[in-house]
Structures are given as structure tokens and as C-alpha cells.
Amino acid sequence: MMKTKLKTWGKLILLLIFILLTFSYAMFQGGFVSWFLFFSFVPFALYALCIAFYPLGDLVIDRTFNKDTYLAGEHLNVVIKINRKYSFPLFFLIIKNTSSLSKENGKQIIFPGFKKHIQIEYSMPNLPRGEHHFDKIYVKIGDPIGLFEKEKEYLLEKSILVYPAFSDIIYRSFESRYEQGATASQIKIQNDTSMVAGIRNYEPGDRFTWIDWKATARMNEMKTKEFEERQSNDVSIILDRSPSSSFEECVKFSASIIRTIIQHGGQIGFYSIGQERTIFPIRGGEEYRQQLFHHLAKVKADSNDHISAILDGESAFYQRSASLLIITSNLTQALVEMVRKHVQRTGTVIIFVVKNDNEPFLDDEYQLSSIATRYGVFVNFLHEKDFRSALTGVKQR
């Protein structure tokens, strides 16, 4: 502050010296040219003096956006309003709006003149996914000869949330059921113990609580209750947050499939493992979708471990009544071997390998896909243009 004040007073002294020099030149030289030079310089010098003492606290600044939440790829429209108490003419006014999107975005120069109310509008196209912060607005004024410039910053903190974009996906339900026996099947039966459909002869493996004691006593042989079959469309989704050039495509596909399943009445459990571990229990509904989208808006590719290492031993990821979907951009043998262990207890297991349009799938990945199919794990390779038909290509064995 002291340095700025000394610099300002130095310029004031210099300006007074210029005025005295031009006046002295006119007095001693005389003639039209010398006096014309003096009277031409005086207005600029006086205006510069006024700028030096003009209070930037006179400005009242407000910044508004067309909305608070956006989808990735949309345009952000920013409106900056400036109101002044006094109509002192300003030769120019530079506005710089800083944000986490760009330090220089929104820098504009205007010539307000005597205007007391000024409005500036500009657009920021193709918003990236994430939470973006707007903090300071810098205002700068000056005189035509460039001798005095004044700058002031206004703190106007504001955040916007950009949700991931999504694609419309053709819906196909994931049928995951349970049945008796040790044979693995993706179409299994889960008995609804609240709905008794009948009785049958006792079979080894039936639960003790299923025995119908009244029927057993009446018929003099062990009888077991039969329950109505209940189909579950619950889905557990695991997002691989390993650093990847296709991570944004993985997030977009996650948002697309979450939106589609919830719209059709399904329930989702979502698992997002990075530097911070976030686990959403199986639920449904629009409010829950908003929670998942809020997480996807902020999520980062910050996992230090590959997803196969994260899945190892994590029983919380696997629900017997839910199909398991894994979204990754890198299919590895370790991942295939890991999900092989869980096919029998989870039913449907699908790996979506998502990459950007410029990144081809490798021959090694196709070979691993064939191995996974033999294990009962379906692998679906997707570019963004394939998102719409992602579920129609999922086959159950």
C-alpha cells in the first residue's frame, strides 16, 4: 500500500511539472502554437487528476447467472451489472471476471462515458463437468494519456455445479433371481417369504424355518412351504476411478445408465472408490438420482489402485439380489479373475469397457472378453455412440 501511494504521489508531481512546463513554454515562446499546445494538454491533465481522486468505491457490482446447475457441454451466460452513484465520465473501464474455469475469461473493455448503469453479458461455451467457483471481479479505470490507472477487486463468491451429460439408453431390465442348489445361474429365484403359494415335500437344503409343521403333522411327513417367486431388478454399479483418458466417458455412461434404470423404476447401489470411498446403498427415486448426479459432478479420477485390487475382499460391493455392473476403461486379466469369484453369488455380472471415440479397443481386451464369457461374465465394449444400445446388447445366459 505504501509503495502504491508513493507511486501515485510521484505521478501527481510529474503531472504538475508537465503542466508548469507547458505553461512556461507558452509564456516565454508565445504564439498560437505554444498556447494551443498548453490549452490542448490542460483538459487531459485535469481529467487525469480527477481519475487519480475518483473513488472506485462508488461502483456497486452484481453478477448473475442464467441458472445454478448445468449439464456438461452447455453454455453459461454471465451478466455483470455495474451501478454508479455519480455520472462522472469514464474514458474506459476494464472488467475481469475470474473463476476456476479460466483466470482471464470474461475480460472486457467498455467505454461507459456518463452512464450510471452498465450491463455486461458474455457466454462461456462447453462447460466441463465439475464444481466451478467464481470469486473476484477486477475493475480498472484510467485516463487517455495512460498516466493514472486505478484498480479495485470486488469479492463476489459464487459456485455452479455442472452435472455430467447423459445419453438416452434403450432400457432392458436386469433379471437376477435365486434358486436352490449350487449351480450358478444368472436367472435365479428369490423366494418372497411373506407370500406363501403352497406346500411341497421337504428337500435337503430347505431352511428349517420353511417347514410347515401343521401340514407335517397332518400328513405324517415333512412338508415345506412354497413361496411366490420374486424378481429383483436391483443393480449395483461400480465406477472405476483409475486415471484414464476416457474417464469422462465413463462418468457420462454412469450418469446415463443411472438415469435410465431409475426412470424405469429400478433401484441402484453405487460404489465410487478413489482417494475418498463413497458407497450409496441400493435405493431408487428421483431424489436419489439427484444425489448420485451430485456425486458424479464432483468425482475425480484419483484412485491409486486398479479396480481389481479394490474389489478384492470387498463383500460390501456384492448384493445377492442385485446384478453387478462394472464400468471401466481398462479391461485386465486381474479384473476378469476377480469377478469370476463372484459370479455364482451375484448372478448377472457385466463389465462395460468404455473409451473415447479416438481410442480403439485392443486385441488383448477382446481375448479377455472371450475368457470372461466362459466364466459367465458378459463384457460390452462401448464408445460414446454405442451408449444408446448398451443394454440391448447385454445377454443373459
Image (spheres, rainbow, N blue to C red):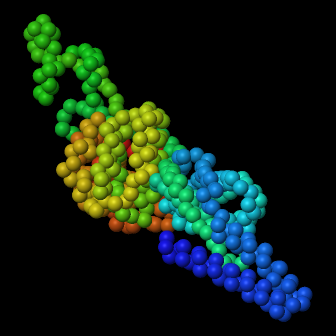
Residue in the picture at 82% in, 92% down: 28
Q: Quadrant of residue 362?
A: bottom left
- Is 223 on the left or on the right of 242, as rendered? left
Q: Which one is in front, 221 or 259?
A: 259
Residue in the picture at 61% in, 47% down: 66
Q: Looking at this rendering, what residue extends furthest in the bottom direction?
A: 29
Residue 34 location, x and y as percent? Answer: 84, 88
Residue 164 location, x and y as percent? Answer: 49, 51
The quadrant the C terminus occupies is: top left
Residue in the picture at 76% in, 75% down: 44
- Is 374 on the left or on the right of 355, as rendered? left
Q: Looking at this rendering, what residue extends furthest in the right direction?
A: 32
Q: Quadrant of residue 332?
A: bottom left
Q: Which one is in front, 12 or 63?
A: 12
Q: Which one is in front, 324 or 302?
A: 302
Residue in the picture at 50% in, 53% down: 157
As displayed, is residue 161 above or below residue 52?
A: above
Residue 20 location, x and y as percent? Answer: 73, 84
